[in-house]
Amino acid sequence: MTTPTIPAAGRGFGAGTTPRFLLLSALVLITAVRLFERLNAVLFYAPSHDLLGGIGCYLAAGEDPAGDHVANQQALQRPGVREALESCLDLPGQRDPVWPLVVEMGLLVVAAAVLYFVLPLWRSRPGRVVELDERIDPSGELRELVHGLVGVAGLTRPPRFVVDPAARTPGAVVFGRWGRYTVCLHGGLLVRRVEDPLGFRAVVLHELAHLRNRDVDITYATVALWRVFLVVLPAGVLLSIAYLRPAAPSLFAAQNHRSSLQDLFATAFLVVLVYLARAEVLRVRELHADLGAVQSGADPQAWHRDARPPRRPAARLLRWISGPWRTHPDGTQRQLALSDPTRVFAVPRLPVFLTGVTVLVVVGTARSSQAVTQRVGIEPVTTAASALGAALATAVVGAVLWQSAVHTPATSRPRAPAVRTGFWFGAGLVTGELALDRVTDGWLPERPQFLLVLLLIGVVIMWWTAEHVDLWAHTRRGRRSRPAVLLTLTATGLVFGTWFAWWQSEGQWWVQGRPIVDPQGVLRLYDTQLPGLLDANSGPLALTAATNWVLGRLGTDQSVLPGAHGLLLAGALLWLLPLTTALSRNGTGLPLRRIVTCAACGGLLAVAALAVVRLLLHDAVAPGPGRPAALLLHDSTWTVAVLTAAAAVAGGTAGARSSRYRLPTGLATAGITMLSGQLASFVLESADGCWGPFDVLTDSCGWRPGGGWSYVAGNTPELLGPGIFLVAAALLVLAGRRERPEPPAQSTMPRPRLVVSVVAVTVVVLGAASWKPAVRVSSPTAGGIALTAADLPVASSPTIHRLRVLAWLKYGGQRLLDDISGKQNTFTVLVTTPPLTYRDVVDRVRPLCLDIERDVAAARAYFPVPDDEAWRDWTAYLDDSARAAVTCRQAVDANDVALFRSAGQQMQQTFFSHRKIYDRLQPFLR
């Protein structure tokens, strides 16, 4: 067998253990957080104090734990509710203590660090190993041999060599920390040196390759994390099993049997993921060490004695299934890796899939952490967790993609389709979403088809990342590619973070069954921006408004970036970055001539489509109030739609004609096509009124560039933001086409720098012109977007409705009602008990009236009653009480006897309004 060639691009790149260890660490820590939080709910929360647990204040605020997310957000956005919620959460016992979680996680990290330091000491303890000195090697031949192999392996600092005489296996092991490493030779290996010198040399070079790859520290950190995790795991598993008992504590009464089983399955699923991530770290390092040993001159035949390829299909299937669970590769895997080193550097499926799952687990755990969200708020936690998840995905997947891309230019092995990487990442996202049970009320989500949106997010973004990293690795070889690849990964983090945050705030609720949009509510919203829109006589106006709303909100989360402009920046990076590779002098960048040619054809298609739209809109809205507003909405919406479609056609054509990098080529073509369409829109709108049957907004001919520029700038965020991503999703049809060899283009684009510069400057100018302050709105309701205290979402069940009212009473409503009515009774007793002197009135009655005023103000600052009828009665009672108290104070200050009598009568009238609210609330207390 010939010695395998290790491509120069792959030498010294490392064993790839760092991103895998980062993935393992994230999985262990986030799983530990979930287990600790469940444990803390039992140990540090007193159920006897508050049977409503940590959700009481949210129930009083009008939230519905089983209801719609957006409706709950609207409940909290009512006037004064946020402030009342903060005051309620400040009550004793309402915020889960965070210190136990901090202490527990700190202890876990400290325990892992201690174990990391102790394990090497334990392995090298006296009595188990002995120094490789003259006692073991009197002639010095063995010491000379191993120190010579240190030089062959390329190590500048030799490790310590010891011998384990009791170990009869013909192997060795390396351990240590921070530059203090030890190679332990087994007693059986010393015997093998005599019988098989080449095998001895291969084993020692293999262990030295671990030192050159710098994976020893990561290995022992992996072992330490795993062992600490095994100590933490039983408590969480036993607690999950305890939830299944019928006699579970009342604190957990809201959990049914299904949710308890799902929680147990989720815990078991996370444990499996942790084990697979650990096995991946330990297994991959061995394959890279084998390659390093062969690179240093080891005989590949030394690994072939253990290679026994299975012959039966069942045996091959069993080996394929057991492969990911192995911490060490078997002989067959090692033989395949040595015969074809590109297998080791190929993009692995398992880490990519595990990364997708981990990203969802990180964000889901952070959002469900009561100890964190009660102090910081759900939106900042979502923003931070989405950014952390995007950084994790970029670091792990980006690292393995970069390693593969740096290696493949030096090989002739066909690349795996880049879309496959995206598929496994997207599959991990979907699996994590289902495993967390965030989108299901039963065993399956109500609308599982919308999980395809999450799958598309993962597929498209990682497909682009894989192709773009590979593109730059071919365009700029060696270290020159690092800045470009780092910029690529930064763009990946920004793009994925933007879309992932949108999924948390909007997308996942589509899966749960919430309507995507309310057309009538959108019309009311747009009527505030386009006055008269509701009066327009246009049949499809609601459909157009809904389409415009979805396009404007798709991928946009106001909590993360400034609205659609953050998505505009992300979308621009997807096609401007790869377009710059067309400036490469070695001809390995994107084919600029083909891109511009297809974009020009796409521009012509866009002009034709715009003409059709304007022709259809010419008489689409009957004359009358609101016609200009309706036409403007129709025009802008369908202009964005047809330009996106034209860009998809042009991008698909350019991508289909390319042998490689179909997605970057297609997106660059689509982006230039959109700019061409924007130019055509500018001309058409600026000269509106001069086109005859193609006129839309006016019949007066004239050149109005200001209006045309405003129109184009207004469409830019939707077109170059969500529009680019829709084109990218459409280009998935190209993913199944086989790559074919393509000779370098014989003719190049003249002045490519000028072309790329003009395109980039145009995007920057349009983006700057379209910038407007972000306006934060919720999904509109049929009643409009102006929320009042009475806009309470309907409870999902009578039980939730009753719990809302009980929570309102418990956390302040009952006390306020009793305080106000008690002071009113005291007032009545004082003024009806003679003799009442003026001094009595000043000293005793006036302070009582002031107290009632203050209590009424506190009651108005408290939550609205989460019951429509009770809210009306409560408001009437507070109005009556405030009126009587103010009249009382004014009468005393003015020494007006008649006004004081009127105050007494008003105070007596509050008895009736008090009785009304009291009777309304009584049924909830039974």
Image (cartoon, rainbow, N blue to C red):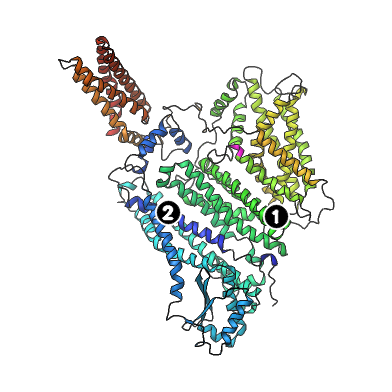
Q: Which residue is mark 2?
A: 33
Q: Residue furthest top?
A: 898
Judge from the rendering whether residue 291 lies leftward or rightward of residue 784; answer left or right.
right
| Rendered position, 39 above or below 164 | above
Label 1: how many residues lie within 10 Å, few (<14), some (14-19) or many (20+)? many
**Type of amino acid under label 2:** Val
Confirm whether residue 326 shows in the render: no
> Residue at position x 79%, y 40% from top?
601
**Which of the two discs, 2 and 1, labels the residue nearer the N terminus?**
2
Q: Residue furthest left?
A: 835
Contact (Cβ within 8 Å) of mark 2 with mark 1: no
| Residue 472 lies in quadrant | bottom right
Q: Which residue is mark 1?
A: 472
Residue extent of the magenta highlight: 560-565
Q: Nearer the viewer, residue 414 or 184?
A: 184
Circle nearer the viewer, 2 or 1: 1
x%, y% of residue 554? 59, 39
Confirm whether residue 675 shows in the render: yes
Task: In the rendered structure, find residue 916 and report the number of the disc placed on it.
Answer: none
Q: Secondary structure at mark 1?
A: helix
**Type of amino acid under label 1:** Trp
x%, y% of residue 396? 57, 57
